[in-house]
Image: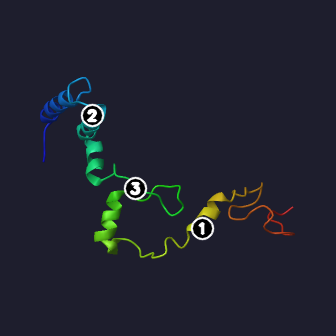
Protein backbone atom coordinates (compact mmCIF):
# COMPACT_ATOMS: atom_id res chain seq x y z
CA UNK A 1 0.00 0.00 0.00
CA UNK A 2 1.27 3.46 -0.82
CA UNK A 3 1.63 6.06 1.88
CA UNK A 4 2.93 9.56 2.26
CA UNK A 5 5.59 10.99 4.53
CA UNK A 6 2.96 12.35 6.93
CA UNK A 7 1.27 8.96 7.26
CA UNK A 8 4.63 7.28 7.90
CA UNK A 9 5.55 9.84 10.56
CA UNK A 10 2.18 9.47 12.29
CA UNK A 11 2.35 5.65 12.25
CA UNK A 12 5.95 5.68 13.50
CA UNK A 13 5.14 7.95 16.43
CA UNK A 14 2.18 5.82 17.42
CA UNK A 15 4.08 2.53 17.16
CA UNK A 16 7.19 3.87 18.88
CA UNK A 17 5.14 5.19 21.81
CA UNK A 18 3.44 1.84 22.34
CA UNK A 19 6.65 -0.21 21.91
CA UNK A 20 8.96 2.06 23.92
CA UNK A 21 10.83 0.12 26.63
CA UNK A 22 9.94 2.69 29.32
CA UNK A 23 6.21 2.12 28.82
CA UNK A 24 4.20 -0.77 30.26
CA UNK A 25 4.15 -3.65 27.76
CA UNK A 26 7.00 -2.21 25.67
CA UNK A 27 10.32 -3.90 25.04
CA UNK A 28 13.69 -3.03 23.57
CA UNK A 29 13.34 -5.64 20.83
CA UNK A 30 9.93 -4.32 19.75
CA UNK A 31 11.18 -0.75 19.76
CA UNK A 32 14.20 -1.74 17.63
CA UNK A 33 11.88 -3.45 15.11
CA UNK A 34 9.74 -0.30 14.88
CA UNK A 35 12.85 1.83 14.42
CA UNK A 36 14.25 -0.50 11.73
CA UNK A 37 10.92 -0.45 9.87
CA UNK A 38 10.89 3.35 9.96
CA UNK A 39 14.47 3.47 8.63
CA UNK A 40 13.61 1.07 5.79
CA UNK A 41 10.40 2.84 4.81
CA UNK A 42 11.61 6.41 5.29
CA UNK A 43 14.39 6.24 2.68
CA UNK A 44 13.29 5.62 -0.95
CA UNK A 45 16.43 3.65 -1.88
CA UNK A 46 16.22 1.52 1.27
CA UNK A 47 12.53 0.88 0.61
CA UNK A 48 13.27 -0.36 -2.92
CA UNK A 49 15.93 -2.69 -1.51
CA UNK A 50 13.47 -3.94 1.09
CA UNK A 51 10.86 -4.58 -1.62
CA UNK A 52 13.43 -6.57 -3.65
CA UNK A 53 14.33 -8.67 -0.59
CA UNK A 54 17.87 -7.35 -0.11
CA UNK A 55 17.41 -7.49 3.67
CA UNK A 56 16.83 -11.27 3.68
CA UNK A 57 19.58 -13.75 4.56
CA UNK A 58 21.50 -14.60 1.40
CA UNK A 59 23.23 -17.72 2.65
CA UNK A 60 26.75 -18.70 1.66
CA UNK A 61 28.22 -19.77 -1.66
CA UNK A 62 29.83 -23.19 -2.12
CA UNK A 63 33.19 -21.86 -0.95
CA UNK A 64 31.60 -21.05 2.42
CA UNK A 65 33.04 -17.56 2.69
CA UNK A 66 31.09 -15.28 0.34
CA UNK A 67 27.42 -14.44 0.34
CA UNK A 68 25.17 -15.97 -2.25
CA UNK A 69 23.14 -14.08 -4.84
CA UNK A 70 20.50 -11.59 -3.71
CA UNK A 71 16.97 -12.83 -3.08
CA UNK A 72 15.65 -11.01 -6.16
CA UNK A 73 18.10 -12.89 -8.39
CA UNK A 74 16.96 -16.20 -6.91
CA UNK A 75 13.35 -15.35 -7.72
CA UNK A 76 14.27 -14.37 -11.27
CA UNK A 77 16.29 -17.57 -11.74
CA UNK A 78 13.38 -19.65 -10.52
CA UNK A 79 10.64 -18.07 -12.61
CA UNK A 80 12.67 -16.88 -15.62
CA UNK A 81 15.48 -19.46 -16.04
CA UNK A 82 15.84 -18.70 -19.75
CA UNK A 83 17.45 -15.34 -18.84
CA UNK A 84 20.42 -17.07 -17.17
CA UNK A 85 23.04 -19.47 -18.58
CA UNK A 86 22.61 -23.15 -17.75
CA UNK A 87 25.42 -24.24 -15.41
CA UNK A 88 24.26 -27.37 -13.57
CA UNK A 89 27.64 -27.85 -11.88
CA UNK A 90 28.47 -24.20 -11.23
CA UNK A 91 30.83 -21.93 -13.11
CA UNK A 92 33.18 -24.15 -15.16
CA UNK A 93 35.93 -21.50 -15.16
CA UNK A 94 35.71 -20.60 -11.48
CA UNK A 95 39.08 -22.12 -10.54
CA UNK A 96 40.85 -20.74 -13.60
CA UNK A 97 39.66 -17.20 -12.85
CA UNK A 98 40.76 -17.50 -9.24
CA UNK A 99 44.23 -18.69 -10.30
CA UNK A 100 44.58 -15.81 -12.77
CA UNK A 101 43.68 -13.31 -10.06
CA UNK A 102 46.31 -14.76 -7.69
CA UNK A 103 49.07 -14.71 -10.33
CA UNK A 104 51.08 -11.46 -10.17
CA UNK A 105 51.33 -9.47 -13.39
CA UNK A 106 54.70 -9.66 -15.09
CA UNK A 107 55.86 -6.17 -15.97
CA UNK A 108 57.28 -5.25 -19.36
CA UNK A 109 60.89 -4.15 -19.39
CA UNK A 110 62.25 -1.13 -21.25
CA UNK A 111 61.99 -1.53 -25.02
CA UNK A 112 59.68 -4.54 -24.84
CA UNK A 113 56.35 -3.94 -26.61
CA UNK A 114 53.02 -4.57 -24.91
CA UNK A 115 51.94 -8.17 -25.20
CA UNK A 116 55.52 -9.47 -24.94
CA UNK A 117 56.88 -10.20 -21.52
CA UNK A 118 60.37 -9.89 -20.15
CA UNK A 119 62.05 -13.25 -20.56
CA UNK A 120 59.42 -14.63 -22.91
CA UNK A 121 61.82 -14.95 -25.80
CA UNK A 122 65.42 -15.97 -25.36
CA UNK A 123 68.10 -14.85 -27.80
CA UNK A 124 65.86 -12.56 -29.82
CA UNK A 125 66.35 -8.86 -30.26
CA UNK A 126 63.38 -6.53 -30.09
CA UNK A 127 65.31 -3.38 -30.97
CA UNK A 128 68.15 -3.05 -33.45
CA UNK A 129 71.53 -2.20 -31.88
Q: For the point 46% across and 55% down, which residue is it?
A: 67
Q: Circle 1 sits in a helix, a strand or a loop, which is it?
A: helix
Q: Nearer the viewer, residue 126 or 18?
A: 18
Disc 1 to disc 3, C-alpha distance: 23 Å
Name which of mark 2 and mark 1 comes first in the sequence: 2
Q: How many marks?
A: 3
Q: For the point 13% across and 45% down, which residue is it?
A: 2
Q: Which residue is mark 3?
A: 58
Name which of mark 2 and mark 3 comes first in the sequence: 2
Which image quarter holds the C terminus? Answer: bottom right
Please identify, in this view, whether the residue under mark 2 or under mark 1 is nearer the observer: 2
Please identify, in this view, whether the residue under mark 1 or under mark 3 is nearer the observer: 3
User: What colour scheme has been applied to the protein in the rendered image?
Assistant: rainbow
Tag 1 near tag 3, CB within 8 Å = no
Residue 106 vertical position relative to residue 16 in the rendered view, above or below:
below
What residue occupies the far front of the structure in this picture? 24
Q: Residues within 10 Å of mark 3 (few under 14, many from 20)?
A: some
Residue 54: % across, % down = 34, 51
Residue 89 vertical position relative to residue 103 in the rendered view, above or below:
below
Q: For the point 30% across and 53% down, which residue is it?
A: 53
Is 39 positioned to the left or the right of 2 in the image? right
Q: Residues within 10 Å of mark 1 (few under 14, many from 20)?
A: few
Q: Circle 3 sits in a helix, a strand or a loop, which is it?
A: loop
Q: Residues within 10 Å of mark 2 (few under 14, many from 20)?
A: some
Q: Circle 2 sits in a helix, a strand or a loop, which is it?
A: helix
Name which of mark 1 and mark 3 comes first in the sequence: 3
Q: Which residue is mark 1?
A: 95
Disc 2 to disc 3, C-alpha distance: 23 Å
Task: Tell me which corner region of the image, top left, top right, bottom left or bottom right, holds residue 19.
Answer: top left
Disc on res. 35: 2
Is 91 positioned to the left or the right of 44 in the image? right
Disc 2 to disc 1, C-alpha distance: 43 Å
Amino acid sequence: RDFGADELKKAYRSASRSAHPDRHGGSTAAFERVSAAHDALGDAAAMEGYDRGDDLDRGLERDGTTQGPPFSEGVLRRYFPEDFPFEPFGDPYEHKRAAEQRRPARPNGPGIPDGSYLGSCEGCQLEPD
